Image (cartoon, grey):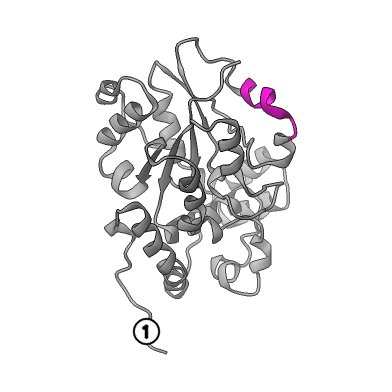
Amino acid sequence: MPAPDFIIIGGQKCGTTWLRYHLRQHPDVYVPTNEAQFFNRSQNLARGRDWYESFFSKAGPDQVVGDKSPDYLWTTSDGARNHIAGSHERIYEMYPDMKLVVTLRNPVNRAVSALNHFIRRGHVTPLYGIDPLLFGDEQDRIEGLGIIEKGYYYRELRPYLDLFDRDQVLLLFFEDDILQTPRETLRRLYDFVGVDPAVGDEVELGRKRGEHYLSLLGLLLQYYVLPKDLVKLIDRPLPATKLHPSPDSVLRLYDLYEKENEQLFDLIGRRPASWLRTTRRAVE
């Protein structure tokens, strides 16, 4: 069975699905549609290397093979659903020459997007809104999901860079690279994984299909585990809902990530303007 040549390690809600979609457009690349979640899930890790490499069994003999499992970037702590810390060490031990693809997004926007994602998936109730879940009395409801923690990019990326050579890591920014310069980014991506970058000028650029937004009633019904087909039927005529944090919560998120961001910028030598806040908290 083939071993992967590269891994998209994350981050979660940072454009990794866009990367996988366009890698799959290249005839010389194979990436499965499912996430293996091998190096970060205890029950999958116990199944062994052969089980992991079976994910790539449909790859052609001359194709470059990749895995996309964005929770691999959450390296420093355990979490819900059997997530275990230390993916970087396990990847390095098994595949020390592995190429790694990392894409990062403004951590404030990432946290809000991730929380909406877990609400849409029925893992978190929408009843309380975003503010109490992030900073209020309902924080225990998101414990173990890494909503805040996965945005501490310096803390999570540094362990990889301590093990892997810098030329083994392609680091992209969601706002600057994927949104602003997608063609150039595709060429860089194809070249990095070892296939003809000129194909990046020919493939049809696509956007990740957005997740379906349910109404507030639909979100509640889904949370209480009604059949999905029934939820969609009830929800169809109702207006979609996307939950937003208050301006104060947004500023609190910027405060949380400010020091971490500065450490990241120093580490990688790049400072995306799209991550800088434009407002300041009022003096209390």
Q: Quadrant of the N terminus?
A: top right
Confirm whether residue 242 shows in the render.
no
Where is residue 103 shown, x and y percent of the image?
Answer: 41, 44
Secondary structure mostly taken by the magenta-highlighted segment of the chain: helix
Q: Residue furthest bottom?
A: 284
Seen at 36% across and 47% down, the residue is 174
98 to the left or right of 180: right
Q: Which residues are magenta?
A: 46-54
Reply yes or no: does residue 51 show up in magenta: yes
Which residue corresponds to mark 1? 282
Residue density around tag 1, few if under 14, some if 14–19, many if 20 or more, within 10 Å: few
Q: Nearer the viewer, residue 117 or 98?
A: 98
188 to the left or right of 133: left
Where is residue 91 shown, x and y percent of the image?
Answer: 57, 36
Seen at 57% across and 72% down, the residue is 135
Reply yes or no: does residue 267 show up in magenta: no
Where is residue 246 shown, x and y percent of the image?
Answer: 46, 71
